[in-house]
């Protein structure tokens, strides 16, 4: 016999529980990292932009009863105007380190304010740590419209396209030695 547990929301955009600077949060991705629960979340900032956030439980906390602490700022600063993901960053998916590769976060990126229909452009983004540990690198992994792919040189799209394991029509693959060819 299954048991349904009904609790209160962690954050409620219509209530008084929203953290300062954030209007709404969604698309949680929960992981136990180094013994501590971490949640990566898509959020709508008070600056009216979709950004990626991180929340953590204090050491020893459990997700069902813990007091989640949302980091004050998004995981990465907002992209510059015209960047492939300047319109929004959301739906994070954390991948733990494995096979000699560091942890990374894939996410959906949008180039403009159009959420759907003609003129809306989405791509898959990838966040990784700078090899020297000095920050986070952001790059476009692959776009979905007509096989077009993005480069790691934003704000413009480039002929050096990233195909993430395949070569869609009308794109060129980046050589294996390139730091942007590793999209898996």
Image (spheres, rainbow, N blue to C red):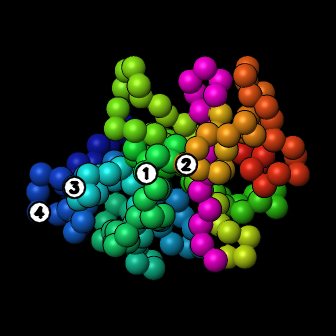
The answer to the question of whether label 1 and label 3 lie on touching residues, with beta carbons closer than 8 A, is: no
The answer to the question of whether label 3 and label 2 lie on touching residues, with beta carbons closer than 8 A, is: no
Q: Quadrant of residue 54?
A: bottom left
Q: Secondary structure at mark 3?
A: strand
Residue 151 position within the rendered picture, expressed as x and y whole percent measured from the top left: 67, 44
Residue range corresponding to the magenta coloring? 134-148
Q: How many marks?
A: 4
| Residue labelled with disc 1 | 81
Residue plotted at (50% across, 47% down): 83
Q: Nearer the viewer, mark 4 or mark 1?
A: 1
Alpha carbon distance from label 4 to label 1: 32 Å
Residue plotted at (47% across, 31% down): 121
Q: Secondary structure at mark 2?
A: loop
Residue 10 position within the rendered picture, expressed as x and y whole percent measured from the top left: 26, 59
Q: Nearer the viewer, mark 1 or mark 3?
A: 1
| Residue labelled with disc 3 | 23
Residue 16 position within the rendered picture, expressed as x and y whole percent measured from the top left: 11, 63
Residue plotted at (12% across, 51% down): 14
Precedes in sequence: disc 3 or disc 2: 3
The answer to the question of whether label 3 and label 4 lie on touching residues, with beta carbons closer than 8 A, is: no
| Residue labelled with disc 4 | 16
| Residue labelled with disc 2 | 155
Quadrant occupied by the N terminus: top left
Q: Nearer the viewer, mark 3 or mark 2?
A: 2
Q: Nearer the viewer, mark 2 or mark 4?
A: 2
Precedes in sequence: disc 3 or disc 4: 4
Alpha carbon distance from label 2 to label 1: 7 Å
């Amino acid at each position: 016999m299954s048991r349904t547990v009904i609790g209160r929301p962690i954050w409620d955009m219509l209530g008084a529980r929203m953290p300062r600077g954030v209007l709404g949060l969604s698309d949680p991705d929960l992981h136990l990292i180094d013994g501590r629960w971490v949640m990566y979340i898509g959020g709508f900032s008070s600056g009216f932009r979709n950004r990626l956030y991180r929340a953590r439980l204090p050491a020893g906390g459990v997700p069902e009863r813990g007091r989640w602490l949302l980091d004050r700022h998004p995981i990465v600063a907002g992209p510059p105007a015209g960047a492939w993901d300047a319109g929004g960053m959301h739906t994070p998916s954390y991948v733990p380190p494995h096979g000699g590769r560091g942890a990374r976060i894939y996410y959906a990126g949008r180039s403009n304010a159009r959420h759907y229909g003609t003129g809306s452009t989405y791509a898959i983004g990838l966040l990784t740590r700078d090899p020297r540990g000095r920050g986070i690198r952001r790059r476009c992994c692959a776009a979905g419209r007509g096989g077009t792919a993005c480069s790691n040189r934003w704000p413009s799209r480039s002929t050096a396209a990233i195909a993430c394991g395949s070569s869609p029509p009308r794109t060129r693959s980046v050589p294996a030695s390139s730091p942007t060819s590793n999209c898996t």
